[in-house]
Image (cartoon, grey):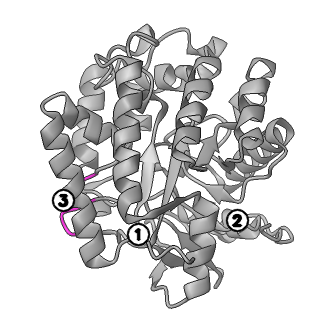
Amino acid sequence: MTDPRPLASVSLDVDNLWSYMKTHGDTGWESRPTYLDRFFPPVLDALDQLGLRITFFCVGVDADREENLKPFQSLTARGHEVGNHSFEHEPWLHLYAPDALVQELERTEQAVERATGQRPIGFRGPGYSWSTALLEILADRGYLYDASTLPTFMGPLARRYYFMTAKLTPAQRRERAQLFGSFADGLRPVKPYHWRLPSGRTLLELPVTTFPVVKVPFHLSYLLYLSRVSEGLMSAYLGTALAACRLTGTEPSFLLHPLDLLGGDQVRELAFFPGMDLPGARKIELFLRVLRRLGEHYRLVDMSTHARAIIARGGLPLRDADDGRPAAAAAPASAPRTAA
């Protein structure tokens, strides 16, 4: 029988220990400390419990390191999709010149394919960072979709909290001045659309879904934060967000991060991060509860499955890719790669 439920995609940004330390301004990140060998086994087991296959957006420098090879191999061995999350995971990717963007994408593609046997066809910018030049290069390299936008008004608040807790130099603060986006990002669509690029091509955008109309986030990080006040509040908030999605015909793209499933008892170096007072075992329980709730209303799939279904339906709106920076006329023009 055909499953009558609409689709929803689930993805996880594989941000490693060193990347949190680097963004926070902590010393010692240069040695690339990792928790991937501790993180992947329980998460993959939990996904198996749900019978769920998702998309893991992978950082190239991690996939390129020998100590992470087995953890990354386990992703595709267990049937999951891998995506491109840049090579160095710098949330100021929008400041990169086109040739540097090409190098970021290419190095990550090579590292991820070596480690997993699968070449990425989807991209998410670290810290939701993107640019018109980046979108042009993704289209040039044959990507099926981008998933870098977070349509919320709350980016400046998140950035202010981050600056209050991070140990940054003035130069680092300038570099991170657009971290988590601007208030204007709340005006972007929640539903998927096609970017209309300066070159005349189009590229599918799958935004991280926020609460329709009010544009406040409801991905797992926010739900866990609410659970610390009241699990009833968390459940009510999630239920209301899903009801708004159903009412507006929005098929969610639901976002996860490693710290949604790792507790402060497992990664003491990141105790500063909100929600790290919850133990990892409790986070896994809440994760299972939330994903089962989501699965009551939607058929949960990986990002490329969702993207292909959306494209096949047709009728998507077009949105001009204008980020206020120079367009990607200088982006290298290589032969497009067919998205498999």
Do callouts 2 and 1 mark residues in contact (Cβ within 8 Å)?
no
Amino acid identity at mark 1? Glu
Q: x, y percentage for residue 61?
A: 71, 31
Q: To which residue does mark 2 refer?
A: 143
Indicate the secondary structure of the residue bearing disc 3.
Answer: helix
C-alpha separation, residue under disc 2 versus residue under disc 1: 21 Å
- The magenta stretch is 211-217
Q: To which residue does mark 3 refer?
A: 240
Amino acid identity at mark 2? Tyr
The answer to whether residue 119 is above or below residue 268 is below
**What residue sits 37% from the left and 55% below the top?**
294
Nearer-the-camera pick, 113 or 53 = 53
Quadrant the N terminus occupies: bottom right
Q: x, y percentage for residue 151?
A: 33, 61
Q: x, y percentage for residue 141?
A: 77, 64
Residue at the far front in the pictured view: 1
In the image, is 175 to the left or to the right of 76? left
C-alpha separation, residue under disc 2 versus residue under disc 3: 34 Å
